[in-house]
């Protein structure tokens, strides 16, 4: 289940339309048995346009993006999932964890957790690492060869916060997942350089008509009508 799926180019056009968020709120209520909280809607409103602007600036218009993808058989949702094919044609999924953070409190004795506002939450690189491991393990490689990657996008975070979070993750498996802040995501840099930061520089559009197990995604990877917008 997911709230929206389409090409990056399509999503970038739709996400700035006033009715888009309202449609996603309605679909969320239908899928999950209750509407999103005001905090969650504010998060969508702030993060989705920022992410789509970054992906467009990186020249990734033809990749496929899924917003609020619910991992099967769990209560976990990936903020955004990019789908493409690497140079060998292997289906590649890039899980993106979005945060609007500008400051958090960290503790070197508990590197896997941070205090964001009044909430103790997982370090975002650890969180996205969990999504990647799930994607790798949910579908057997004999059933569908899949390469999974993960990136943390902190589109409002300055260098100080980014450095703190990178330092916490540096000595563990979470170090494998890039943590990108405001300066890293500067949309005036060359598109290829930005795509490299996002672990997407080698990706091409997903091969059409590649069928995925229904337990993982609704139907075929692009370009299918049932993925064209909320509620379809």
Image (cartoon, grey):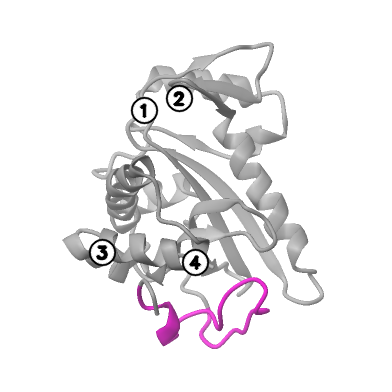
Mark earlier in primary sequence (1, 3): 3
- Which residue is labeled 1 in the image? 157
Q: Are there few (<14), some (14-19), or many (20+) residues within 10 Å of tag 4?
A: some
Mark earlier in primary sequence (2, 3): 3
Q: Of the residues tagged 2 and 4, which is closer to the observer?
A: 4
State yes or no: discs 2 and 1 in contact (Cβ < 8 Å): yes
Secondary structure character of the magenta stretch overall: loop
Residue shown at 49% from the left, 14% from the top: 105
* Nearer to us in this view, 162 or 126: 126
Q: Which residues are magenta?
A: 207-229
Tell me the distance, in whole angstroms, between the alpha carbons under discs 4 and 1.
32 Å
- Which residue is labeled 3 in the image? 20
63 up-or-down from 122: above or below = below
Q: Secondary structure at mark 1?
A: loop
Tell me the distance, in whole angstroms, between the alpha carbons under discs 4 and 3.
16 Å
Tell me the distance, in whole angstroms, between the alpha carbons under discs 1 and 3.
26 Å
Residue 80 at what x, y percent from top left? Answer: 47, 55
Tell me the distance, in whole angstroms, between the alpha carbons under discs 2 and 1.
7 Å
- Which residue is labeled 2 in the image? 162
Q: Of the residues tagged 4 and 3, which is closer to the observer?
A: 4
- Which residue is labeled 4 in the image? 31
State yes or no: discs 4 and 3 in contact (Cβ < 8 Å): no
Q: Of the residues tagged 1 and 3, which is closer to the observer?
A: 3
Residue 50 at what x, y percent from top left? Answer: 29, 47
Q: Image quadrant for the C terminus?
A: bottom left
Q: Is residue 135 left or right of residue 151?
A: right
């Amino acid at each position: 289940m997911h709230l929206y799926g389409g090409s990056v180019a399509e999503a970038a056009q739709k996400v700035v339309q006033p009715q888009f968020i309202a449609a996603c709120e309605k679909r969320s209520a239908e899928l999950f048995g209750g509407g999103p909280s005001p905090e969650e809607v504010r998060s969508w409103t702030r993060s989705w346009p920022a992410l789509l602007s970054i992906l467009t600036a990186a020249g990734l218009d033809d990749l496929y993006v899924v917003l609020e993808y619910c991992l099967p058989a769990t209560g976990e949702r990936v903020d955004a999932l990019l789908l493409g094919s690497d140079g060998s044609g292997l289906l590649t999924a890039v899980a993106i964890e979005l945060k609007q953070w500008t400051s958090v409190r960290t503790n070197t004795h508990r590197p896997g957790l941070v205090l964001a506002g009044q909430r103790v939450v997982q370090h975002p690189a650890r969180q996205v690492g969990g999504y990647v491991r799930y994607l790798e393990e949910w579908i057997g490689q004999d059933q569908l060869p899949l390469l999974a990657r993960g990136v943390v996008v902190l589109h409002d975070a300055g260098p100080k916060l980014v450095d703190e979070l990178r330092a916490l993750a540096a000595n563990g498996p979470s170090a494998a997942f890039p943590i990108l802040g405001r300066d890293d995501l500067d949309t005036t840099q060359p598109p290829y350089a930005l795509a490299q930061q996002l672990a997407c520089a080698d990706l091409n559009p997903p091969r059409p008509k590649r069928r995925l197990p229904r337990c993982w995604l609704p139907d075929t990877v692009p370009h299918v009508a049932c993925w064209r917008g909320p509620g379809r």
